[in-house]
Image: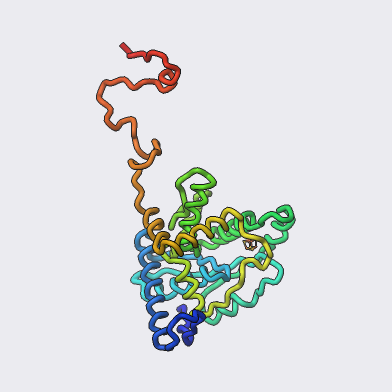
Amino acid sequence: MSAVLPLPEPVSRNPNRQSDPRVVQREQAKLAKRLRRQVGQAIADFGMIEAGDKVMVCLSGGKDSYTMLDILLQLQRKAPVPFELVAVNLDQKQPGFPEHVLPQYLRSLDVPFHIIEQDTYSVVSRVVPEGKTMCSLCSRMRRGALYSYAAEHGFTKIALGHHRDDLVATFFLNLFHHAKLSGMPPKLLSDDGRHVVIRPLAYVRESDIIEYADARRFPIIPCNLCGSQENLQRKQVGLMMKQWERESPGRLETIARALGDIRPSQLSDQKLFDFLALGHRDGAVLADAHAWLAGEAHDSGA
Ligand code: SF4
């Protein structure tokens, strides 16, 4: 049975925060409860986990995936249905990757885990021209390796640590750079149709994760050990979101809620809403658009 580390002695790195340890501890307990509630809600709303599931929890060593694993383990202990959690990390052989950190941490939790070793770093750094960001190819290769492992080992779900702010950022990236209203869904079928991917942190704010990871003192492994820079467009969207949140607190939450409240009849996608049928009278002839634009008399069909 998996165990969850007890919350360590409260630490506050925020100078403005109350320094009374009991107050800090109460705040941290409230935060942990909020995260459990939000993750539980996302699991329930999207049917992410069901009895008998074998869930591969993808662990990168970053704050998001540590938080996801930690909260899932807490929920697993109270869950009314049995399911399995296995932490899986891909060691991509980036220079300086501290390979002992995750096994040591996971053994201390008594969590079943596996480390896949695959040198995607050499491939990515060979293929991507110098000065260009390597993250997109690196992520694709990571996904490929993790998905193959999941297929070979009978996992029924793959859990990724993307949070609410990732979902919102992806929405804006698609809007600004790909002219489409599309994002990062809390649950999806992988492109090859073989895997169900879940994002249990879909309702969780990044700022809460930062605070939780800090309080839990997760042994964070930075992603940018390889020295690659984040994609510029993503960086710009991140800055825009930060500024919004500073100037209009709560705006990101409003946007995240809007992603779950879509009104096709109030947009313009003819594939989602039949605008032609709206107000159409039986037997009335619709003008041919080309003929209309060319100013030709349309054939009444008589
Ligand atoms: S920072 Fe490095 S390890 Fe992280 S996704 Fe980008 S290329 Fe991959």
Front position in the image: 97 or 237: 237
Front position in the image: 241 or 124: 241
Image quadrant in which you'd find residue 88: bottom right
The answer to whether one can see residue 268 in this image is yes
Tell me the residue at 50%/54% (across/down): 170
The answer to whether one can see residue 199 in this image is no
Looking at the image, residue 6 lies above or below residue 228 = below
Image quadrant in which you'd find residue 280: top left
Looking at the image, residue 93 lies above or below residue 240 = below
Looking at the image, residue 254 lies above or below residue 208 = above
Q: How many numbered marks appear?
A: 0
Image quadrant in which you'd find residue 220: bottom right
Which colour scheme appears in the figure? rainbow
Front position in the image: 273 or 233: 233
Q: Position of residue 293 (x, y in %)?
A: 43, 21
**The furthest residue to the left:** 282
Q: Position of residue 180 (x, y in %)?
A: 48, 44
Q: Position of residue 287 (x, y in %)?
A: 36, 20
Which image quadrant shows ligand 1?
bottom right
Tell me the residue at 41%/73% (across/down): 76
Quadrant where the image shows the N terminus: bottom left
User: Horizontal placement of 46 versus 244: left or right?
Assistant: left
User: Horizontal placement of 182 versus 260: left or right?
Assistant: right
Q: Position of residue 133 (x, y in %)?
A: 66, 56
Quadrant where the image shows the C terminus: top left
**The furthest residue to the top:** 302
